[in-house]
Image (cartoon, coloured by chain):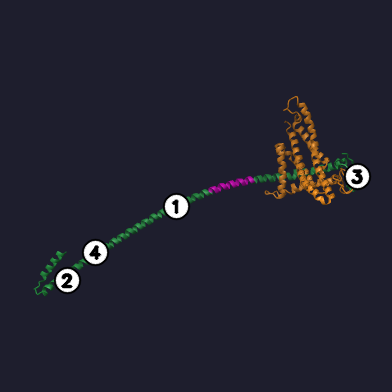
């Protein structure tokens, strides 16, 4: 492709007809482009090597450090949580055992109390029964006595009313004799 | 190429590459502030904005700009480390400089009516020659004459080695050519195609939606190309640097 490095190429005024060849091959524009290119590259290089790259490198290193620290801290916390869980479970088991022991103890105590109360009640009942029996026997004896007296008096009166010469001693003896025979 | 003034259908796809003074109609001298100056300066400004202003917070939990800056840093750093080796990270700032300049220039060039510095062979040739000369000098400084063993393929049969040495030598000197033409060619071609389709869109009237769709698709492709060419240039630099540091096959 032929190049025509004419001055017309470089004037901006009449634009469309300017680029008759490839502007890339217009040697007259080379010094300008090369000069500004070198300047641009030097500028970028200094900015990057002095400011940007060290800064980004330090940020990345810092982040790496932070992440490493955080992971270590998380590991430690995890360990602590596991320990806490173990302690909690141990406490739970202890409490349960203690509760069982106390319940067992209470049960035994209550059983003893119940037994004692039962014994006491039984003793009382037995005592009362005994007293009752004594009283019943007494009443029965008293009744027998009365019956005997009534019988003797009745016998004497009967004998007397029949017109016999009643002897108190004889009738009493006869009644006693009869009652013994009945008993 | 440029269909000059044949009635209405006037596409001049190469006009966008013309270097011209920005503030005067005078001749383009070495120090004239030109559109090339402007867009290279914008590339520098954007690099500073991203990497310096973006990382200003130094936050452990990064802001969005800082994430992108760290991403760019990590991307190139890992590339240097993986391709060239751990001993080459001291050259990382140079490689990062190349990457950021090419990437920013490529991306900014995608703004309509902008100028693309990396489409110019003068720019890419300087970049490639800087790498070529730097790497060659470094090779000799680091390895002395044994740097030449790069061309002497000791794993090949002895009879073949002189022939291979010639081939290796030629390919070594072709490196800066392919290195620079690849970048300039890709950017030039993409932007020229965009401009051609834009010309179609202007000429087709009702059917202009077709070229507009095509422009949209090609623009997406060009965004990809802008990044990939910066990546390719950088990774090839790393490969050449590796050859200089470890010339033994």
* Local SS, label 4: helix
Q: Is residue B246 left or right of residue A153?
A: right
Residue under numbered circle 2: A150
Magenta run includes residue A79: yes
Q: Is residue B92 left or right of residue B32?
A: left
Nearer the observer: mark 2 or 4; the answer is 2
| Colour of chain B in the rendered structure image | orange
**Residue stretch in magenta:** A67-83
Labelled disc at residue A98: 1
* Local SS, label 3: helix
Q: Is residue A93 left or right of residue A17?
A: left
Q: Earlier in the sequence, mark 1 or mark 2?
A: 1
Is there CB contact under 8 Å for labels 3 and 2?
no
Q: Marks 1 and 2, how far apart in space?
A: 77 Å
The answer to whether residue B175 shows anywhere in this view is: yes
Which residue occupies 71% across, 50% down?
B64
Is there CB contact under 8 Å for labels 1 and 4?
no
Q: Is residue B187 left or right of residue A82?
A: right
Tell which of B156 and B6 is nearer to you.
Answer: B6
Quadrant of the rendered structure where residue B221 is?
A: top right
Q: Residues within 10 Å of mark 3 (few under 14, many from 20)?
A: some
Residue B93 percent location from the top left of the image: 75, 41
Q: Marks 3 and 2, how far apart in space?
A: 177 Å
């Amino acid at each position: 492709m032929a190049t025509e490095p004419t001055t017309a190429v470089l004037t901006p005024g009449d634009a469309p007809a300017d680029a008759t060849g490839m502007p890339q091959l217009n040697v007259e524009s080379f010094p300008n482009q090369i000069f500004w290119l070198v300047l641009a590259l030097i500028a970028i290089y200094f900015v990057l090597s002095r400011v940007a790259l060290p800064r980004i490198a330090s940020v990345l290193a810092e982040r790496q450090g932070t992440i490493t620290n955080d992971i270590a801290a998380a590991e430690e916390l995890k360990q602590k949580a596991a320990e806490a869980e173990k302690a909690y479970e141990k406490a739970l088991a202890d409490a349960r055992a203690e509760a069982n022991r106390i319940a067992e103890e209470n049960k035994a105590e209550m059983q003893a109390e119940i037994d004692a109360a039962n014994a006491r009640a039984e003793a009382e009942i037995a005592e009362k029964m005994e007293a009752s029996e004594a009283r019943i026997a007494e009443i029965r004896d008293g009744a027998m006595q009365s019956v005997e007296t009534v019988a003797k008096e009745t016998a004497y009166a009967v004998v007397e009313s029949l017109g016999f010469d009643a002897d108190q001693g004889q009738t009493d003896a006869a009644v006693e004799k009869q009652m013994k025979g009945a008993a | 190429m440029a269909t000059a003034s044949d009635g209405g259908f006037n596409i001049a796809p190469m006009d966008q590459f013309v270097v011209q003074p920005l503030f005067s109609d005078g001749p383009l001298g070495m120090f004239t502030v030109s559109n090339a100056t402007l867009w290279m300066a914008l590339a520098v400004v954007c690099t500073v904005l991203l990497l310096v202003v973006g990382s200003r917070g130094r936050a452990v939990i990064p802001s969005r700009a800082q994430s992108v800056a760290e991403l760019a840093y990590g991307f190139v750093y890992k590339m240097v480390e993986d391709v060239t080796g751990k001993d080459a990270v001291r050259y990382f700032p140079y490689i990062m400089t190349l990457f950021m300049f090419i990437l920013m220039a490529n991306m900014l060039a995608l703004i309509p009516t902008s100028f693309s510095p990396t489409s110019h062979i003068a720019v890419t040739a300087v970049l490639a020659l800087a790498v070529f000369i730097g790497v060659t000098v470094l090779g000799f400084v680091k390895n002395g004459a044994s740097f030449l063993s790069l061309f002497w393929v000791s794993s090949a049969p002895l009879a073949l080695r002189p022939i291979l040495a010639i081939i290796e030598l030629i390919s070594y000197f072709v490196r800066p050519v392919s290195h620079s033409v690849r970048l300039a060619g890709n950017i030039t071609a993409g932007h020229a195609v965009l401009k051609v389709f834009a010309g179609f869109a202007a000429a087709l009237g009702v059917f202009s939606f077709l070229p507009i769709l095509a422009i949209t698709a090609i623009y997406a492709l060009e965004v990809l190309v802008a990044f990939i060419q910066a990546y390719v240039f950088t990774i090839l630099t790393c490969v050449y640097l590796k050859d200089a540091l470890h010339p033994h096959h």
